[in-house]
Amino acid sequence: QLQLQESGPGLVKPSETLSLTCTVSGGSISSSSYYWGWIRQPPGKGLEWIGSIYYSGSTYYNPSLKSRVTISVDTSKNQFSLKLSSVTAADTAVYYCGTNYEGAFDIWGQGTMVTVSS
Amino acid sequence: SYELTQPPSVSVSPGQTARITCSGDALPKQYAYWYQQKPGQAPVLVIYKDSERPSGIPERFSGSSSGTTVTLTISGVQAEDEADYYCQSADSSGLMARVFGGGTKLTVL
């Protein structure tokens, strides 16, 4: 049974880069069945897809965030990562990682709260 | 940018049927997915590919599609079904951009 766990700083200063890692257990990130995605949810608001990556490194980003987002994969560590640059208070959110299987996000991490504040 | 439109709220009494709609121009060409999210929890996939139900999801959850609108139907609503529900799909640009609807709060009266 695949499980995902997000990790990273809970507090980031404005204008800096937010960095999060998602560790995959119970299966291989190199599985050809899955894409791996990041989704976020600002407090009290809805879900927003950030981007997805295939184990080969192919990436797909939300057009509204594309200029600031980098998603990468480390198959040796069974992890994939998110970097979001030039953050502002509007980037404060719970960040989820998830499996992206045939279009659906079918397995989610528990989420990690990231606050952007000085 | 592509958008999926959901009603902000739906209210039903226990035992009744709840229907939550999601509208988007690309829905005739792209599958829709539905998620249930309870407070403080990660979303859970309840419907995939318009009308398929993942294992472990109760049979009272069903999905349908007609033109530019997809519908999540919960038959015989129970108190535990009170949650936020989100639809999700992809745009038709070929860029594989995923999109979520704004979410619908289901209240069980």
Image (cartoon, coloured by chain):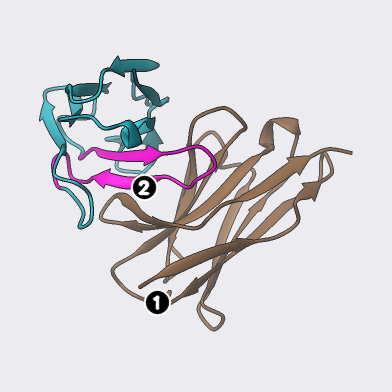
Chain colours: A brown, B cyan
Q: Which residue carries the number 1 mark? A: A30
Coordinates of residue A62 in the picture (x, y in percent): 48, 40
Question: Residue at the location (70% across, 46% down)?
Answer: A114
Name the spot of residue B14 as percent of width and height, x first: 24, 24
A90, above or below A76, in the image: above
In the rendered image, residue B43 lying in the magenta stretch gets the answer yes
Name the image quarter holding residue B99: top left
Name the amino acid type tagged 2.
Val
Which of labels 2 and 1 is toward the front? Answer: 2
Q: Residue furthest bottom?
A: A76
Count of labels in the image = 2
Quarter of the figure with the C terminus of chain B? top left
Residue matched to label 2? B44
Amino acid residing under circle 1 = Ser
Q: Residue placed farthest to the right in the image? A: A118
Q: Position of residue A83 (x, y in %)?
A: 65, 54
Q: Residue A98 or B19: which is nearer the viewer?
A: B19
Q: Which residues are magenta?
A: B31-52
Relative placement, left or right, of A58 versus B23 is right
Secondary structure under the numbered disc 1 in the rendered image: loop
Q: Identify the subunit bearing mark 1.
A: A
Q: Residues within 10 Å of mark 1 (few under 14, many from 20)?
A: some
Front in this rendered view, residue B91 or B65 = B65
Q: Left or right? Give the position of B55 relative to B91.
A: left
The answer for which chain carries disc 2 is B
Instruction: Estimate how packed mark 2 is, as few (under 14), some (14 to 19) or many (20 or more) residues with alpha carbons within 10 Å.
Output: some
Residue B22 in the image: x percent, y percent?
A: 27, 23
